[in-house]
Image (cartoon, rainbow, N blue to C red):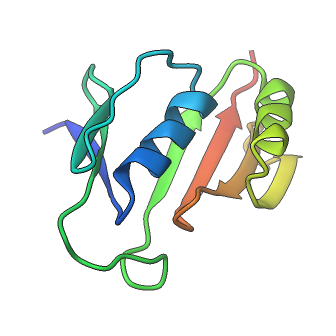
Amino acid sequence: MKLGEVCLLTGDVCRLADFYRDLLYISETCTDPVHQTIIAAEPSLTVYNDGQPHCADRSPVALAFTVEDIEAAYQKLLSLNAPIVQPPAVQPWGAVNLVFLDPDGNQVYLRQFPH
């Protein structure tokens, strides 16, 4: 078994999808207010409005993305005014992690592994 998709549930698909496209440097656009695919390759990343109210307290999600340059990613998040939970910090296992909240309050980790 392998992970096939991460789907973020939200009441505002366009806002959340635009945030992730901007964060991930994806230039494609879509205006579908119900479902958008951000990353099509498996595991895919999609944003979906299932018609239910969602907030971080009700349906918490944590995502982890591996990046090549954690400092550049951190600067990008600052430019997007994303709430930073933990700035870049070296972990005991050697990776550098940072944690932020997306516009719906989902906790997201960015990590850079040692080369």
Q: Residue furthest bottom?
A: 57
Quadrant in the picture for residue 93: top right
What residue appears at the point 74 percent right and 44 percent down from the top-left corner? 97
Please give left or right for residue 98 compared with residue 15 in the image: right
User: Is the residue 20 above or below the residue 81 in the image?
Assistant: above
How far from the left and from the top, in percent, is residue 57? 47, 85
Q: Is residue 94 visible?
A: yes
User: Is the residue 113 above or below the residue 74 in the image?
Assistant: above
User: Is the residue 55 above or below the residue 44 in the image?
Assistant: below
What residue appears at the point 28 percent right and 31 percent down from the top-left corner? 43
Q: Viewer-proximal residue, 113 or 78?
A: 78
Please give left or right for residue 36 compared with residue 15 in the image: left
How far from the left and from the top, in percent, is residue 12? 39, 59
Quadrant housing the C terminus: top right
How far from the left and from the top, in percent, is residue 31? 32, 35
What residue appears at the point 62 percent right and 32 percent down from the top-left corner? 23
Quadrant housing the N terminus: top left
Q: Is residue 3 visible?
A: no
